[in-house]
Image (cartoon, helix red, strand yellow):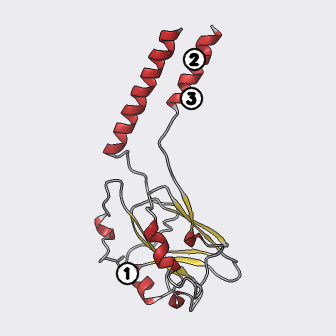
Amino acid sequence: MAVHGLLFAIMFFVSLQTNVFAYQYQVGNLQSWNVPTSKDPKVYANWPKKLTFRIGDSLLFLYPPSEDSVIQVTKESYNACNLKDPILFMNNGNSLFNITTPGIFYFTSGVSGHCEKSQKLQITVYASDGSLPPSYSPSDALDDNAPSYPTVFGGIPSGPSPSSSSTVKTSFLMFVAIGVLIFGVV
């Protein structure tokens, strides 16, 4: 009887398996979010090119809160280094931006003059099918009248994508196969 309880427990824990992979990226792989040095002046332009950001990932900006901050801005504000009316303002020195939607995201230092010295970051997050939503095409920007919501908390989650149903089916089939094997041995 104890064997059946143990087998049930094993099957229960196997059924809990998930395929969730989310990464926390320390921005620039640097000790601190700051003005790039002369040794690596394009650190924030080059760093995201090496990575594939996905929904569920997050960006960690580390910096002395008395010396810097991070703001999320529109494409126009990013290109012009305009610090007025940011979408999101973070200034605690340990700022975490959670990626909850696909799109192009623009960040810069909230300190005057730092953006002009290349302390700014642009990342692209593609949907699971490899596309960007129409409102995030590279040539577009947010309308000036668009509401500014802190995207750090994201929007309303949507249902599972068609590709996730195959993962669920595979997990279920694996669960059934393991159950048949275990109970066939007993």
* Residue that appears at 56% across and 70% down: 27
Which x, y percent locates residue 173?
A: 39, 26
**Quadrant of the image containing the C terminus:** top right
2 and 1 marks in contact (CB < 8 Å) = no
Q: Is residue 182 above or below residue 156?
A: above
* Residue that appears at 47% across and 16% down: 181
Q: Which mark is residue 144?
A: 1
3 and 1 marks in contact (CB < 8 Å) = no
Which x, y percent locates residue 66?
A: 71, 81
Callout 3: few (<14), some (14-19), or many (20+) C-alpha neighbours within 10 Å? few
Which x, y percent locates residue 52?
A: 43, 62
- The residue singled out by tag 3 in the image is 13
Q: Is residue 19 above or below residue 73?
A: above
Q: Is residue 151 above or below residue 43?
A: above
Mark 3 secondary-structure assignment: helix
Mark 1 secondary-structure assignment: loop
Q: Amino acid at mark 1?
A: Asp
Q: Is residue 141 left or right of residue 89?
A: left
Q: Amino acid at mark 3?
A: Phe
Which x, y percent locates residue 82?
A: 47, 88
Q: For marks 2 and 1, give the one nearer the viewer.
A: 2
Q: Nearer the viewer, residue 139 or 159?
A: 139
- Kindly report the distance in space between the C-alpha atoms of the residues bearing marks 3 and 2: 10 Å
Pick whichever of labels 3 and 2 is earlier in the sequence: 2
Pick whichever of labels 3 and 1 is earlier in the sequence: 3
Q: Is residue 113 left or right of residue 146?
A: right
Q: Is residue 103 left or right of residue 97?
A: left
**Quadrant of the image containing the N terminus:** top right
Pick whichever of labels 2 and 1 is earlier in the sequence: 2
Q: For marks 3 and 1, give the one nearer the viewer.
A: 3
Q: Is residue 184 above or below residue 102?
A: above
- The residue singled out by tag 2 in the image is 7
